[in-house]
Structures are given as C-alpha cells and as structure tokens.
Amino acid sequence: MAEMEVWFAFIFHLKSAGEPNAELSDAIFPLVIQLIDYLEQQELLKQGLDKDVEAERLYALVDGLALHAMLEPARLNKQRMIRLLNGHLDYICCSEEPQ
C-alpha cells in the first residue's frame, strides 16, 4: 500500500499547489473502459446499460476501494474488495451465456 500512499500524497500536493494542466492519469480509467467494451463485445454486458455511466461507476468503485483499503485495511481487506467487485460485475453482466 505504500505506493498508493505516495501517489495520493503526490496528487494532493499538485492539487494544493494549483498546478495547471497537470496530467494525473493512473491508467485505471482507460482499463475500465476497455473492460466495459470487452464485456459488451462478448455480449456479457446487460442490454440497455449506459456504457459511459457504467465505466464511471466501476472506476469510482475501484478508486474508492483503493482509498478505503489504504485508510482502513482491517475493515476493507482483499477478500472483501473481491466480493464487492464481483458483486458489481454480477450486477452489470448477463446471468446467461450468449447464444
């Protein structure tokens, strides 16, 4: 978790220093978009979902889990995070195999 603490400290420093146009990409959001696209291409994503909204929602979940795992590791351990992510993926994915 030390890497995440350094990342958050760096981000907060840049934001508080008022750094204009600082490119602060953790590369997670593009991966989330790729995942949502993949689920759609494989016909695993539930019909009618707004892909942009679902990408933002999953990104927020991953980001929030990372932050809270750093702040409260005893409460939010690896197994709990896996259950939460699996639950969200179950929610956005079809329960049946594509035909």
Image (cartoon, rainbow, N blue to C red):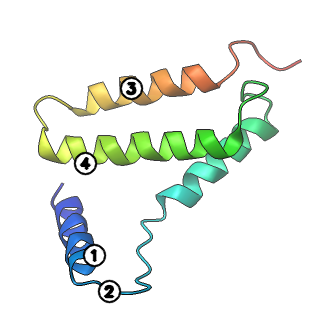
Quarter occupied by the N terminus: bottom left
Q: Is residue 57 left or right of residue 2?
A: right
| Mark toward the start of the polypeptide (3 vs 4) | 4
Q: Residue furthest top?
A: 96
Q: Is residue 23 above or below residue 47?
A: below
| Residue that numbered label 2 is attached to | 19
Q: Which residue is mark 3?
A: 84
| Mark 2–mark 1 CB contact (< 8 Å) | yes
Q: Secondary structure at mark 1?
A: helix
> What amino acid is at disc 3?
Leu
Q: Position of residue 89 (x, y in %)?
A: 55, 27
- Decide: few, some or many residues near mark 3? Use Cα within 10 Å; few <14, some 14-19, many ≥20: some
Please tell me whether residue 67 is drawn above or below residue 21 in the rendered image.
above
Amino acid of disc 1: Lys
What separation in Å lies between label 1 and label 4 (alpha carbons)?
17 Å
Relative to residue 62, is residue 91 drawn left or right? right
Say left or right for 80 vs 86. Answer: left
Dot placed on the residue nearer the N-terminal end, 4 or 2? 2
Q: Which mark is residue 30?
A: none
Q: Earlier in the sequence, mark 3 or mark 2?
A: 2
Q: CA distance from mark 3 to mark 2?
A: 34 Å
Determine contact: label 4, label 2, CB under 8 Å.
no
Mark 3–mark 1 CB contact (< 8 Å): no
Identify the residue at image location x=89%, y=18%: 99
Q: Are marks 3 and 2 in contact (CB under 8 Å)?
A: no
Q: If you read the primary sequence from the N terminus, does the residue marked by circle 3 or circle 1 appear first? A: 1
Extreme residue toward the bottom, this view: 20
Packing grade of label 4 (10 A; few <14, some 14-19, many >=20) is some
- Residue 67: assigned label: 4
How busy is the neighbourhood of tag 2: few (under 14 within 10 Å), some, or many (20 plus)? Answer: few
Residue 31 in percent (x, y) is at 56, 55
Can you tell which mark lies on residue 15? 1
